[in-house]
Amino acid sequence: MNIVSNTSYKPKVTLEKKDELLQLLQGYRINDVWDLRDNFFEVYDSKESWRSNKKRIDFTSFSFYIRQELKYFFAIEILNRSVTIGTLLSYSFTFKHLAAFLNKHYPNIHSFIEIPYERGLMKYKSYLINRNVNITNSKGQISSKAIAFFNRAYQFLFDFYDIREEFEKDIWDVRNIPNVRYSKSKAEYRISFHDIHPSYREAVKKYAKFTTVSRSFSSLQTILRGIKHFIVFLQKYYPNWNGITDLQRSHIEQYLLYVNHNLGHLSEGTKADYLYGVKVFIDYLQRTEHPKAPTTPVFTLFFKEDFPKQRRWNENEIKYIPDSVMSQLELLLSHNPDELNPPMKDSDKKYIPVIILLMATGWRISDILNIRYYNCLITDTNRNYYLQGDIPKTDVKQHRIPIDKDVALIIQAVIEQTKDMSTIENNPDRYLFVHTKGKRKGNPFCSGNISRALNRLAKRYNIVDQDESIYHFRNHAFRHTKGVELINLGMNLTHIMKWFAHSTPEMTLVYAKIADDTLRREWEKAQKKKGPLLRVNLDNGQVNEMAMDEDLIHWEYIRSNIEAIRVPLGFCLASKKEGCPYVVTPCLTCPNFCTTPDNLCDFEREIRRVEEHIQMTQNYPIYNEKTKEQLDNLIKIRNQLVEGKSHRGESAKKILFDAQIIKEKGVSS
């Protein structure tokens, strides 16, 4: 993100800033020609890091004022070790073009930032092209040391002269805001308000300033994206508004349709986050009585059902790394990197310990890169090893998990290496995986560099999936993979929750997936423990082993894992608790049933049949229980019939009584 091109603000070149600039340009730095062979530069960089025949940086082609600014820029870059001297030397190769351009188009400026940035950059590109200087790469993209130096120098001097408070700017650098929570393992640390319409910008900035106290940088970014989409909607349909005082429920309903139409490609969770951002923004404006706040209360603007429900992941959608891919990666990492064909590049070697920790721990990449070398490796009295680190997402301090000796030895080697390289100046926070020089000096590795290194290794050493395609790694997939691994190894969910430092069981249950091949293996183990299925021929008493066809295997597996009950003609899969609903003749307990002594013989025959059936099924309690109830009902009614009485259900009694009344009325009339 180029701050300069996204603002109309122009810093002033003050006397105080000029004095600050000149105070640094003392001693050797005051020279207009720097000889890099001078001992002055040895403390900052090794001469082996630049191998050009040119050994001098010559500033004399620039006017006096521009010369001082560029020397100051180079001096700060060297002092901070933001770039190597070799990089600055390559910048100096473009001096002749830039100096000639400035002398032609801007001969009277007293500061580099007096050049109107966008117009000046366009002119400079045209100037270079007209002199046959190539400024594009093979893809037609701008790629030129001359352009890179112009941009970097302008940005540096713009920031140097900009004395505004961070919250006054239209682009904030969260590194300059005290106590803001942000991940140093990402190279993203700016919040831009430039793309917000001026009518709403200050209100949004005021809300964002308030929110930096309670929310993380990434959370604030998500909320702001939602607010920006809402403001784009307002500008499209209500361009004459300069606030949202007239906002009504009807406008929100219109916006919901707009979201579904224009942001339908986003997940339900993301859409819900964006809508939530709009809601909390409006809520803040109303609670602070902001003049641009809606007069309609926020709770009548948004309803609960407006927010899409996040779809729960199906266990088959958990993006874990297949066992075959993990095996290939483990095999690759077990070799000496220098003995591989081709040998592993040094730029990838440094990421191997991070990859090993991803595999061994399942921690988030940001948590691994947040580890500090002074307290990350713990050993107890029994010589057991633990990895320790803070988990910012769930605010768990000094979280520790067990690791094996091999992983511990790797961590110990990295600790020693990092301690030797670290100083209070290049690693003040004592990170284990840290950049000790360059523009990210003092910060941990970038998480994106880890995944890019993994995918370079996959391509270079042919790590493939089941379809023989080069596997594409994602850092977070290692976390899913570890969760599935621990589940498949039988670890208790409570212990897995502790391992991952989850704040709720729901987070852990996401990983509670038993892989299909694991389920199959366990089933096959169970099958081996069972004897063969046998069939008895009742005619000749011969016993034969049954053919194990696939359908029968699945039936036997189901029967073995469900409370199936053997009944005379097969198996009953009904619950033992519920019993059998089909054994009892339903009429016996029906309120509409009635019978007379004329049916006594039928009842006697039915009682004998049921008694015989009970005798046959005496070994099947679930079957017998209901049959005995049926027998009791039969005997109870039979006894009534023996006494010459009729049996009538409650409804039958009423029907017969009503019929008797009607009959009597008919006789009397």
Image: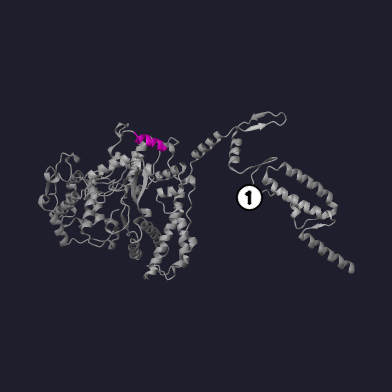
Left or right of residue 477: residue 48 = left
In the image, the segment drawn in magenta is 325-334
Horizontal and vertical percent position of residue 657: 81, 64
Q: Quadrant of the C terminus?
A: bottom right
Main SS category, magenta section:
helix
Q: Position of residue 316 (x, y in %)?
A: 49, 44
Q: Is residue 188 left or right of residue 257?
A: left
Residue 470 seen from this side: no
Q: Residue at x 62, y 33 (%)?
A: 533
Of residues 538 and 226, the one nearer the viewer is 538
Instruction: Tell me if 581 is positioned left or right of 97 in this view.
Output: right
Whether residue 631 is visible here, answered yes or no, is yes
Query: Which residue lies at the image location 28% right of the left edge and 63% below the top edge?
Result: 168
**299 relative to 29, above or below:** below
Quick one: SS at disc 1? loop
The residue identified by callout 1 is 577
Magenta stretch encompasses residue 333: yes
Q: Looking at the picture, how far across and down is residue 342, in whole percent? A: 31, 32
Residue 165 location in percent, x, y?
A: 25, 62
In the rendered image, residue 383 lying in the magenta stretch gets the answer no
Question: How crowded is the residue under tag 1: few (<14 C-alpha within 10 Å), some, or many (20+)?
Answer: few
| Residue 483 occupies quadrant | top left
Q: How is the image coloured?
A: one colour
